């Protein structure tokens, strides 16, 4: 179906671009989170945590991939709990 006017065409182009950016951000965050979750030791996880936190902060600041300030805070909190569990299991 062809959009009825120029503004609709532009909106479609913008939506495609935003969808691609959101998909990329979401994928990168999930990959990083998977690395942290699968880490055998807290040292392995700690290498990835700064990168994950940075991506979460940027996504929340730009409103990318459905990430809000609170959602990224929840993710960080869960990662913190994982790190505590890993370091506790080692001790």
Image (cartoon, rainbow, N blue to C red):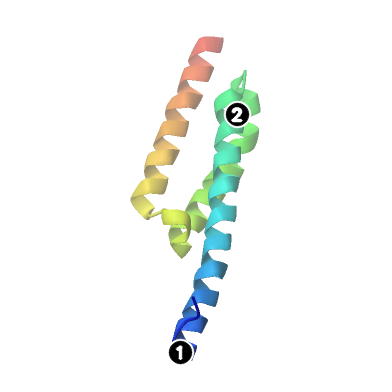
- Residue 21 against residue 79 in the figure, above or below: below
Quick one: SS at disc 1?
Answer: loop
Q: Nearer the viewer, mark 1 or mark 2?
A: 1
Q: Which residue is mark 1?
A: 5
Q: Is residue 91 visible?
A: no
Total numbered circles = 2
> Which one is in front, 18 or 78?
18
> Which one is in front, 32 or 42?
32
Quick one: SS at disc 2?
Answer: helix
For residue 15, side relative to residue 50 (left or right): left
Q: Position of residue 91 (x, y in %)?
A: 53, 9
Residue at the image point whose x is 55% and y is 68% from the top: 16
For residue 43, side relative to residue 30 (left or right): right
Q: Which residue is mark 2?
A: 45
Per the rendering, the mark at residue 80 is none
Residue at the image point whose x is 55% and y is 45% from the top: 29
Q: Position of residue 19 (x, y in %)?
A: 52, 62
As drawn, which residue projects farthest toward the left?
Answer: 70
- Residue 87 against residue 51 in the figure, above or below: above
Residue at the image point whose x is 57% and y is 69% from the top: 17
Q: Residues within 10 Å of mark 1 (few under 14, many from 20)?
A: few
As drawn, which residue projects farthest toward the front?
Answer: 1
């Amino acid at each position: 179906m062809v959009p009825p006017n120029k503004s609709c065409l532009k909106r479609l182009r913008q939506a495609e671009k935003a969808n691609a950016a959101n998909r990329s951000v979401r994928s990168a965050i999930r990959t990083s989170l998977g690395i942290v979750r699968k880490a055998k030791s807290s040292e392995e996880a700690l290498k990835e945590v700064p990168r994950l936190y940075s991506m979460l902060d940027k996504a929340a600041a730009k409103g990318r991939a459905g990430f809000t300030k609170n959602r990224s805070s929840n993710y960080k909190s869960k990662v913190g709990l994982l790190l505590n569990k890993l370091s506790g299991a080692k001790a």
